[in-house]
Amino acid sequence: MKRPIAPSEASPQQRVAARRTALAMGLIALAVYVAFVLSGVIGR
Amino acid sequence: MATHAAHHDDHNHAPSGFLDRWVFSTNHKDIGTLYLIFALVMFFIGGAMALAIRAELFQPGLQLLAPEVFNQMTTMHALVMIFGAVMPAFVGLGNWMIPLMIGAPDMALPRMNNWSFWIMPFAFALLLMPLVLFLAFGIGGGGPAGGWTLYPPLSLQGGSSFAFTIFAIHLMGISSIMGAINIIATVLNMRAPGMDLLKMPIFVWTWLITAFLLIAVMPVLAGAVTMLLTDKFFETSFFNAAGGGDPVMFQHIFWFFGHPEVYIMILPAFGVVSEIIPTFARKPLFGYQAMVYATASIAFLSFIVWAHHMFTVGMPLGGQLFFMYATMLIAVPTGVKVFNWVSTMWKGSMTFETPMLFAIGFVIMFTIGGFSGLMLAIVPADFQYHDTYFVVAHFHYVLVTGAVYSIMAAAYYWLPKWTGHMYNETLGKWHFWLSTIFVNLLFFPQHFLGLAGMPRRIPDYNVAFADFNMISSIGGFGFGLSQLLFVYIVWSCARGGAKATAGVWEGAKGLEWTVPSPAPHHTFTTPPVIDDSKLAHGNVAH
């Protein structure tokens, strides 16, 4: 895929912060998924 | 407002090639358009299934559909409408409008935005494939038929289409989670300087809260269907009573996802209506901060009411009372919202363009759906109403005259900003009134059918229910045909029409109305300077 072509982009600080937020949210989603499946496995 | 700063950097450098523009796009506006077109296509596919259901139910007896095909239609209609039409439509609206509303140049993670969208067509190809293969070529046993709730053990007794359904749901969930992550990252990190959280448009607030809901509950659905998959194909017994599993546990897990899912489909609708009503009442939104807190309260309460969907499976009295009262508690923040919408209109200089008509229609008819929800929250009453057409009437008032009406309102409201042309106002009003007459003809009699005891998800019924079913089916076909008018209006608006100004509507306030119409391919490449007095809700002391 091509590089995003917005002519003026987010500042480096914004990029880092956005990536950090995205990573945190992704990890939370993954943790919820794993926790629910594990609760099914362990709870039996 | 910093229109000079914004406009000097507005460019219309859209890629010229079709693939570059639409397949490899990382532009929030183009991806928003893709989402909206996808949602419209799914709306008509799901609508065709609804018409097949209503045609079968036009009169008692089996006419058109074999019972197993009827069950596939009800199941697929729900899955397509929820995951294919309503949710992607709101993601499309969010993609288009959130960066414009907060003064951001694009979404925070443009490549992931592209990926979020392009997962969806593959997910729905998988979901629809078994049904299409069966109906068109007689291959296989058709699609899933156990209802969109996928309750075991019934869902585990289906054919091989089950694997397609589970995989499709996983893909939709991944797409939704990536979309939600993008919206959270955008709103929290990409706002223009001065655009404080409590200066954001309500639509952005409702989407931010919705995105957190998605992060919290889509993995729960994914976990539940993963366990269903292993029960079906890998000999586990999470929900299989014969192996020591608990089918009721699936219902608890499913509705822990399912009830917040209802609010995922309605909170952005609240945001849309909260944008439109102040514009056409020419007054600031009454109680901006109360609206924000009410939205957050509804989101919180949505996590503690799930078992009201399953009173009849049996639970301790304490559990019944808790879930009943918690459910009724949701009426408080929802009532705050309805009160604030009415108060915004109170003594306003109101005009009734099509977006406002749909918004007012939303307020009135969503409230009808809310009231029937309160009736269903009462445990002893729910024992009578459960699994009847009363429930069908209730959630269709919430999701059709609620969520779908708000999407229609949003489409008419922002169409001039998207296309640069005004739509045909006369035809828009025709669309609203035809839709409103027929949608009530379609769903209001279903309350009476349910109260009289007609169960849902049946292809045949007692002759005592014949008259109201016939009226409902006439309403269904009228409503379905009315939506063709919407397609024509959107199509003709995209192709031409009176030129839209930047402000479009006399009472419109906010950053999105400072850019030209149509919005250039790139906007706010230089952050705008925020002038509180020109924001829709900038001065919260209003």
Image: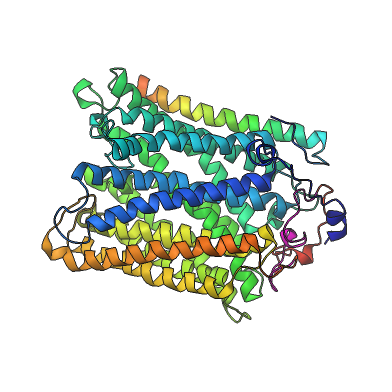
Question: Which residue is nearer to you in this view: B231 or B336?
Answer: B231
Question: Which residue is nearer to you in this view: B59 or B223?
Answer: B59
Residue B342 in view here: no
Reply yes or no: does residue B330 show up in magenta.
no
Instruction: Kindly identify the residue that appears in the image at 48 percent across and 49 percent down.
Output: B41
| Residue stretch in magenta | B503-524
Q: Is residue B257 left or right of residue B92?
A: left
Question: Which residue is nearer to you in this view: B2 or B475?
Answer: B475
Q: Is residue B32 left or right of residue B47?
A: right
**Predominant secondary structure in magenta?**
loop
Assign the N terminus of chain B to one quadrant of the image. bottom right
Scheme by which the image is coloured: rainbow
Q: Position of residue B93 (x, y in %)?
A: 59, 52
Q: In the rendered image, which quarter is residue B57 located in?
A: bottom left
Q: Is residue B219 left or right of residue A2?
A: left
Instruction: Kindly identify the residue that appears in the image at 56 percent across and 31 percent down.
Output: A28
* Image label count: 0
Q: Is residue B531 above or below residue B317?
A: below
Q: In the rendered image, which quarter is residue A44 located in?
A: top left
Residue lying farthest front?
B137
Assign the C terminus of chain B to one quadrant of the image. bottom right
Residue B12 in view here: yes
Q: Position of residue B324 (x, y in %)?
A: 33, 53
Q: Position of residue B152 (x, y in %)?
A: 26, 33
Q: Is residue B486 left or right of residue B287?
A: left
Q: Position of residue B263 (x, y in %)?
A: 47, 51
Q: Is residue B211 above or below residue B481?
A: above
Instruction: Kindly identify the residue that appears in the image at 35 percent across and 48 percent down.
Output: B77
Instruction: Kindly identify the residue that appears in the image at 52 percent across and 27 percent down.
Output: A30
Q: Is residue B87 above or below residue B172?
A: below
Residue lying farthest left?
B463
